[in-house]
Image (spheres, rainbow, N blue to C red):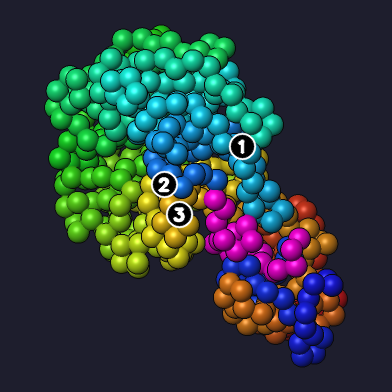
Amino acid sequence: MKSFGNIAKDGQVRAVASGAIADGNPVIVNSDGTVSDASGSALALANGTPVAYGDANTAYQSITFDSNSNKVVVAFRGTSDYGKAVVGTVNDTDNSISFGTVVTFEAASQLNNAITFDSSNNKVVIAYRDEGNSNYGTAIVGTVSGTDISFGSPVVFNTGRSDSISIAFDSSNNKVVIAYRDVGNSNYGTAIVGTVSGTGISFGSEVVFKSATTGVTSAVFDSNSNKVAILYNDGAGKAVVGTVSGTGISFGSEATFESGAVDGLSTAFDSNLNKIVAAYRDEGNSNYGTSAIGTISGTDITFGTPVVFESAGILSTGTAFDTGVNKVNIFYKDGGNSDYGTFVVGTVSGTAISFGTPVVYEEATTSAFAATFDSNSKRVIGVNTDAGNSTKGTAVVVRNAGTYPNLTSENFIGFSDGAFATTQSAAINTTNTIDRNQSGLTAGQTYFVQTDGTLGTTAASPSVTAGTAISATELIVKG
């Protein structure tokens, strides 16, 4: 408590808010002396700002979570346009992230990298276009050790120019699936299955899933149906379902999720409701940020009505599903607000999705988004290029509402006496003060802070005593 600079009225304390705090909500103190809304402030940043990890002029970021080492791995194009990667460690105590040494995996110009984690072999796999080798589609296997990563030898999967590359890991068959536009074959949408062995990877035969010019692709694995969905643009937003068998893949019927052209496409799997979540730029609707929800049945996929999450032009998106609270995070550049880095939290219901208020996390021009979920720290990590910082790659850690691995009886300090924005001096009603901002309480009843930040009459885990009610609206804090 020594970092608290001021004593407010009636024994309250004041501390700097890390994220918005709502009036009357329970509050925890962080290790740096700031305070957070235990009802789940939408955003918590390391030191109040995103963290740089890449070189100047970083581009084409992709990110995955290595559940063996509990690290995130970012692949990107860096200095000299070389393919590079770096390992990140999330600290769930203060929602910060730190990075190891940047490693070059391709000492030549590369584009369109995509990354996934093979949980069967505990390896990451990066697929990319190798401009140093005739623009061939190429993949490489990485091994994380501590805060470092090492790589095997690159392997070509397509002896032609490969664009719009995406990748997913099929955990039911222990295979990676790469989707791409095969420029050497009439720009057809194509997929191939890879098998990791040691530090190498081998491939089956290429399979065309769209015999027409195909734009951006995004591959995602549905662990409920054990299928891979590939979403793509062919002048409209389309999708097919792939079934892996051995080293091959077959596809069901094509479905449409957006009648107009799409770009900036990213996907995630909602493992709570078993849905595919797509985020994209709707070029048929003023380039608005839009999302559609897909349901796989057999070898087919159907979609609900698209929902706009940003009524302004966006460029690219990064999407991740938070299994801790069953929420979707979409990161994007908000063209209606100075191209600032922004994210929005979505909740899937049936074949629809609803969104909260967008949150700005980077007040600078941003681009090239990607996102992943760290199931160890229960945090979502978004990455992007930051034009406000020499176009370096930067990362931000998000704690979604309801994610409270750090809520304890020791760091719970009381209730907010008012609504406070990030960096404001927040007044907190602490132990033995009376908080008068509650509702629906029963006098004489002891209340406990729940894991979603609400109050209940029984203890949650961990057990955190909020206090004793003296009226429907008043609570003696920890009294």
Disc 2 designates what residue? 57
Looking at the image, residue 93 lies above or below residue 222: below
Looking at the image, residue 39 lies above or below residue 381: below
Q: CA distance from mark 1 to mark 2?
A: 17 Å
Q: Between disc 3 and disc 1, whose residue precedes?
A: 1
Q: Are marks 3 and 1 in contact (CB under 8 Å)?
A: no
Question: For the residue carrying disc 1, how many other residues have a C-alpha within 10 Å: few (<14), some (14-19), or many (20+)?
Answer: some
Identify residue type, mark 3: Ser
* Magenta portion: prevailing SS class: loop
Specify whether residue 51 is painted magenta. Answer: yes
Assign the C terminus to one quadrant of the image. bottom right
Corner quadrant of residue 167: top left
Q: CA distance from mark 2 to mark 3?
A: 7 Å
Name the one closer to the observer, 310 or 350.
310
Q: Are marks 2 and 3 in contact (CB under 8 Å)?
A: yes
Disc 3 designates what residue? 390
At 46% from the left edge and 47% from the top edge, which residue is drawn?
Answer: 56
Badge 2 element: loop
Res. 294 in view: yes
The image position of residue 450, as x and y in percent, is 69, 60
At 64% from the left edge and 46% from the top edge, which residue is drawn?
Answer: 98
Disc 1 designates what residue? 101
The image position of residue 270, as x and y in percent, is 46, 41
